Amino acid sequence: MLDRRAFLGRVGRVAGGVLGGALAGALAPEGASARTHEFVFARLRYDSGDWDYNPKVCANVLDAVLQYTQIPVHGEEVVITADSSELTAFPFLFMTGHTLVRFSEAEREGIRRYVRSGGFLFSDDCNHDVEGLYAVSFEAEMARVFPAPPGEAGPEYDPIPRIPNTHPLYSSFFSFPEGPPQTSHELNGWGDNMVHPYLRAVEQRGRIGILYSNKDYGCEWDYDWRNKRFRAEDNTRFAVNLVVYAMT
């Protein structure tokens, strides 16, 4: 278990080598299931696209969790595949990219099992474009993983419906009464030149199993955590809500 002081010192030493070390390290690390009491930032690796984009997100999110909560954290990012037998050991799973998302049948079954066992996958579209390749291919995969129930199949079926801005996710720690906070990438007119005032989700038994964003939080949080002090408002606070929701 790390306190914030120890974590900041550790990140300062290893952050420059994340991609070559922890992030590119062994999948499904030994003893993963023994760490379920602490928050582990797990990243989903998928071979079809740029799964390792936004390498600074982990350190920034861990810093925010330590700054605002009493949740113990694991100090390194873990990379894991959807077909790993250890996937369910991680209550929180981050997925991002710009390009194609294509899973094998074993990976689809792994994601289905992960969600049904109570896992929380946050899928963030770095294109922030509802017609971009990541969005179109990810949504197609979700339709394969969670096909329409009998009697609901058809063009109107949405495997990832929008969640209301009153959803408990937006008050799980900090309060976001207007729903998901905007990102600078939306406001600067990149991607589809739209601000998306909603998030979408796959829910199982009344809880979010997959949270899906076209807002590009990955790029929004992909900066050196030491520069956070220069910001008028900490934009990683919403990440704390995601972590608290996933861990409770």
Image: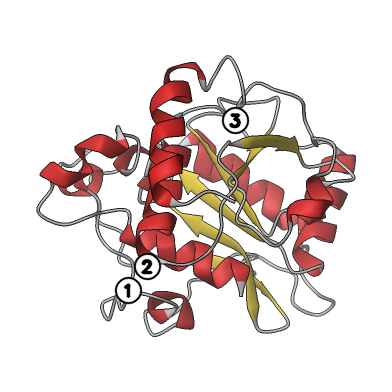
Disc nearer the start of the sequence (2/3)? 3
Number of the label disc, if any, that sits on residue 73: none
Assign the C terminus to one quadrant of the image.
bottom right
SS state under label 2: loop
Gap in angstroms between the C-alphas marked 3 and 1: 28 Å
**Mark in the foreground, 3 or 1:** 1
Q: Is residue 199 visible?
A: no
Gap in angstroms between the C-alphas marked 2 and 3: 23 Å
Residue 23 placement: quadrant: top right
> Compared with residue 38, is residue 167 higher up or lower down, i.e. above or below?
below
Disc nearer the start of the sequence (1/2)? 1
Q: Amino acid at mark 1?
A: Gly
Gap in angstroms between the C-alphas marked 1 and 2: 7 Å
Q: Is residue 84 visible?
A: yes
Q: Residues within 10 Å of mark 3 (few under 14, many from 20)?
A: some
SS state under label 1: loop
Residue 24: where, in percent of width, then height? 65, 21
Identify the residue position indicated by label 2 in the image: 198
Identify the residue position indicated by label 1 in the image: 179
